[in-house]
Amino acid sequence: MDSWVRFNAQSQAKERVFRAAQYACALLGSTLQNDEAAEIRRTVSQLEAHMSLTRKLLRLGNSVEALEAAKRAIHLSDSVLRLCLTISHLNRAMYFACDNVLWAGKTGLISKLDQHKWSQRSFRYYLFALILNLTRDAYELHLLMEREARSRTSKQPSSPSIPLPPDHLPSSSSPATQAMDFGWLYRQLHLVGTVLYSNPPLLLDLVKNSCDVFIPLDRLGIYPTGPGFVGACGLASSVLSILTMVHPWLKLKP
Amino acid sequence: MDPFVKFTSQSQGRDRIFRAAQYACSLAVYLLRNNSDRKDLVAKLKSLETSLSAGRKLLRLGNAANSIEAAKRTVQLSDRVLRLCLTVANVSRTLYFICDNVLWAKSVGLIRNIDKERWSLNCFRFYFFSLVMHLSRDVYAVLQVMTKRSRDKNFKQRMDQHLTENPEVAEVVVPHLDGFLFLLLETLKSHPDLALDSVKNICDLFIPLDKLGLYQSNGGVIGFCGLISSLIGIVTLTQPRLRIAP
């Protein structure tokens, strides 16, 4: 009970729980396609809209937090991380600002607001922030893979397990080179698997961002996947983010 | 900017800001109700108030557990009167939160066959009872400090000085009342946390008193009292020394 009280006291945590519930409702609504469940579907979509509006209310101060995070990210030592994280936080701040404008429009404070335009704008900022987060994840993965490959070769100097970059391989499709391609690919995948398995924060962050990226892709019409898939992705990413809140060691730092 | 971020990251901080905004809207709607030029503004404020109230109901969904934990803590207090008052207040608040959650479920459509009026009345009854218990605790704490002070020699000297310098003091009853008020005001001045908590509880009391029909007041009074109590709540959250303990 004590850990629930502590969890509940964090505003972020509540917002994540509501996000999980909202996407669960979206998923449930998309699975109930028959006519008999029209009543349930209406209740579920009403609940989803109510949670979405309340989450917007809860997010009212988040632009400031994102700007503070961007200010902190500027002081990082690694230049790629510094670039990715600062711009990602700035994009998130813009996303929250658009979201606040949308909330004002939905509650009636600003009349005659073009909700569709502002909604698209906010999703564009969100998508860009997610792409930068994914770039950061790929960069961290690349660094860890290099480190792991170096430590492997230093452990076994005799075996030819140094992964050759693809442009060094000949382009002819003889069976020997094809076997080398598959062997190289297998080794790379094995390396990726090892690195991710030994770094759960990176794995969690990568899966979370990958799930999240489908939401703006669908809403902006770039890669429409349907409400069911979007609901499932949203639910998965919310559950993962609740997990990182309950176990702070799972959060990717910085 | 940093203290703002720290404040809003607490769930309670955000809830109190929303509560202050909600009652400010309610007060503004009451003050502008007869102003025909500002009808648009009044409509906007009303819809803002409704959405804030609905949002806060959703945000209160987990709070019953918090109250139970608080009740578990207050059961272990050493002072018997404090233990009784605070534990009963926390239990009553837990029941209020449970009723409030049921009302939320009804408003969203998850539960259908319940008597909304009856549940709403029960909700306000539990809230009223918890406020009465909190006020009793305030009165008890004030009386404790007052009795301790009246025995203090320095204070007795100051009180005699105050009574003798005041030329209007003549009758037998009035000096006692004057002395009592002086003692009360000195107590409240030296214990700002107690004063703030008492004012907050008294302001909060008007809301269920009106909803239960015990003391009908108008929307303006309710908005004003709610706003004052929310502002005091925000101040006690930002300045921990002004928060009453336990």
Image: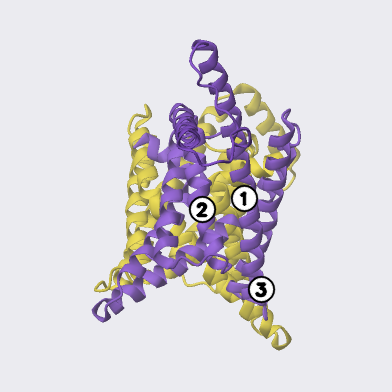
Chain colours: A purple, B yellow
Contact between labelled residues 3 and 2, with CB atoms less than 8 Å apart: no
Work out whether disc 2 and disc 3 sit on a shared chain. yes
Q: Position of residue B145 (x, y in %)?
A: 53, 32
Figure quadrant of residue B229: bottom right
Looking at the picture, does residue B126 appear above or below residue A70?
A: below
Residue contact at pointers 2 and 1, CB within 8 angstroms: no
The disc, 2 or 1, on the residue closer to the chain's N-terminal end is 1
Secondary structure, mark 3, is helix
**Mark on residue A212?**
2
Q: Label 3, label 1: how many angstroms apart (C-alpha)?
A: 21 Å
According to the picture, the residue beneath numbered tag 1 turns out to be A131
* Kind of residue indicated by mark 3: Lys
Choose top left, top right, bottom left or bottom right for residue B152.
Answer: top right
Question: Does residue A23 appear to the left or right of B25 in the view shown?
Answer: left
Q: Amino acid at mark 2?
A: Asp
Mark 2 and mark 1 on one chain: yes
